[in-house]
Amino acid sequence: MKNFKTYNVEKRELLSAFVKTFLSDQKKLSAQMQLHGALDRLEHFATQGKMLRGVFVMLSYEMYGGVSRDEILRVASALELTHATLLIHDDIMDNDQKRRNEPTMFAQYSRDAQKQQLADPVSYGKSVAMIVGDTALLLAFELLSSINVSSEVKKEILVSFSQEMVRVAGGQLLDFDFGQIPLPRTENEIDDMYRLKTGGYTFSLPFLCGALLANANSAERAKLHELTRILGNTFQLKDDELGIMGDSEVTGKSPGSDVREGKKTILWMRLYAACTQQEKSILDSYLGTSLTYEQIQEIRSILHKYEIIETIQREIDTAKARAYEIIDSLKVGEKYKIILKELTDYNASRTA
């Protein structure tokens, strides 16, 4: 995977530098020190991740001949700031204390409130973190509105971006409701939630934005849409697996958080359908609780007993083969086909 990794490192460095400069410039526009502190934390948060969504914008743009570094960095940075917004808000909704092996944004502000001996540190932390997340989203729209392209392309990017954010909100609503309401769900319902909440803005939107900026034709954009749909579904399946099977030191997230939040994932639904009544009772008792190491090991044991992980991996491998076919059909240079295939491999076998 050296080609994809090399490309990712190179573009991530450019993207990180641009985001830092942009947020530094924002601080110069205001004398309010609280906002300066919020922007500092946002800068750290936004540039500490893998920054894949921004890199995907740049990859798609370059695949189809795009050469303007400033314009593509603006759009790529907008995607990364939006990703920061969604993660900050998601952590608040899920009450997650840990992200990338560091305290989440609301946990940081809650800790500050405790030091100041405020009456309700958690509420303070969540409220301030929401404002930081909102700020990131508003700055993303500022970046998108400032790109120097034709009015038609700018409009299409802004509309696509806005529509995708509405779909993400719909996916979040479904995810939250599925976790709160104890009703069985079908795999189609969960697939829809995956596509709305994660797949679209993680893969489809970044690749579409890059292709639009590079003036890729509609036939190529249609192929990218199918490819990114496959990548998005695979990404979420691996995410669900890592929520139970992953090493928290590698994933940077608390193990078993999906179970604690009562989330209806395909992995959990398949496990529940396969196991005995006694095992169902055990799983029921774990939902909504913080899991011990022993409980996580027990869930892992049951997953392997019914080959749930193995079956999902076979489905991922089948999807990967189809992704390869689409990549081979794209009218892009061989260099980019290799990078896309390595991205597909990484997505199907990632550990974080």
Image: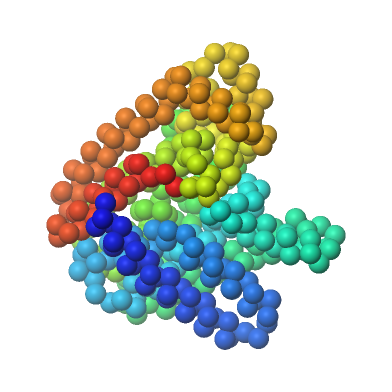
On screen, 305 above or below 143?
Answer: above
Where on the picture, by quarter, is residue 235? top left
Q: Residue furthest top?
A: 277
Q: Residue, x 35% and y 32% (percent of image)?
A: 313
User: Which of 297 and 204 lies nearest the eye of the viewer?
Assistant: 297
Q: Position of residue 87 (x, y in %)?
A: 55, 55
User: Which of 267 and 173 lies nearest the eye of the viewer?
Assistant: 267
Q: How many marks?
A: 0
On screen, 233 above or below 103?
Answer: above
Q: Position of residue 195 (x, y in %)?
A: 42, 44
* Figure coloring: rainbow
On screen, 276 above or below 316?
Answer: above
Q: Residue, x 48% and y 51% (percent of image)?
A: 167
Q: Residue, x 41% and y 53% (percent of image)?
A: 202
**Is residue 39 at all visible to an observer of this figure?**
yes
Q: Position of residue 125 (x, y in %)?
A: 71, 60
**Is residue 162 at all visible to an observer of this figure?**
no
On screen, 29 above or below 287?
Answer: below
Q: Tell me if 345 is positioned left or right of 197 in this view.
A: left
Q: Tell me if 150 is positioned left or right of 43 in this view.
A: left
Q: Position of residue 1 (x, y in %)?
A: 26, 51
Q: Tell me if 340 is positioned left or right of 247 in this view.
A: left
Where on the picture, by quarter, is residue 291? top right
Q: Residue, x 64% and y 28% (percent of image)?
A: 286
Q: Tell me if 207 is positioned left or right of 259 in this view.
A: left
